[in-house]
Image: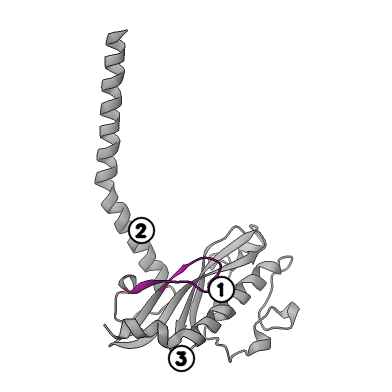
Amino acid sequence: MLRNSLVLGLFAIVTVGLVAFTQQSTAERIAQAERQARIDALAQILPAGSYDNDLLDSQRELRHALLGPRPVAAWIATREGQPAAVILQATAPDGYSGAIQLLIGVQSNGRLSGVRVIGHRETPGLGDKIELAKSRWILGFDGKSLQQPGESGWAVKKDGGQFDQFAGATITPRAVVKAVHQALQYFDAHRDELFAQETAR
């Protein structure tokens, strides 16, 4: 019995050691992969050559009701020390199946450079058309601003706005349109504040 206990104890020590070694040896690779994934996601929002700073190094945390109920990340893009764009992470809390997480790129002139969905639980085949991989609907935001289409246009067509809804799934696009519009309102009110620290570097 003592011998069995010693064998089991030795086995446990060896196993824990192997797990710790594996975790230690792969931690750096995992961190690099995660960093590259973030870079790739942000690169979908801003075209190459439109900024020259390291976006990941410009990350900051924002807290505002227009961006969602929890603190979110923002990345400030500059070119030759001048404001170029900001990528805002925002939450649409009122999706059909829960919160929808978005990345919203806004150029310094207030126009959208792109919007991407980075997390949701919407119904496959219906609400998931907000993903670029499923449809081109999300590209309809490119180039839009608070003035174009104007206040009344920032809604789905069913509500009198300019954005298409999906057959059988109006709640999802309605939530995304609202969240993007609110992000533009936030940018319009806080533009100077967002760019001040980054351009001062």
Quadrant where the N terminus sits is top left
Q: Secondary structure at mark 3?
A: loop
Q: Secondary structure at mark 2?
A: helix
Residue 169 colored in magenta in the image: no
Measured as percent of width and height from the top left, residue 175 is found at 64, 71
Residue span colored magenta: 58-74
Evaluate whether residue 111 shows in this view.
no
Q: Which residue is mark 1?
A: 65
> In the drawing, does residue 192 fall left or right of residue 14?
right
Q: Of the residues shown, which amino acid type is indicated by label 3?
A: Asn
Sort mark 1 into few (<14), some (14-19) or many (20+) by Cα contacts within 10 Å.
some
Of residues 120 and 134, the one nearer the viewer is: 120
Measured as percent of width and height from the top left, residue 113 is found at 47, 82
State the CA–CA distance, disc 2 to disc 3. 31 Å
Q: Of the residues shown, which amino acid type is indicated by label 2?
A: Glu
Which residue is at a point 63% across and 90% down the rendered structure image?
150
State the CA–CA distance, disc 2 to disc 1. 28 Å
> In the drawing, does residue 133 fall left or right of residue 28?
right
Residue 73 colored in magenta in the image: yes
Which residue is at a point 28% across and 53% down the rendered structure image?
29
Q: Which residue is mark 3?
A: 109
188 over 23 or under it: above or below: below
Sort mark 3 into few (<14), some (14-19) or many (20+) by Cα contacts within 10 Å.
few
Quadrant where the C terminus sits is bottom left
Measured as percent of width and height from the top left, residue 38 is found at 38, 65
Evaluate whether residue 57 shows in this view.
yes
Measured as percent of width and height from the top left, residue 140 is found at 58, 79
Q: Which residue is mark 2?
A: 34
Which residue is at a point 29% across and 85% down the rendered structure image?
200
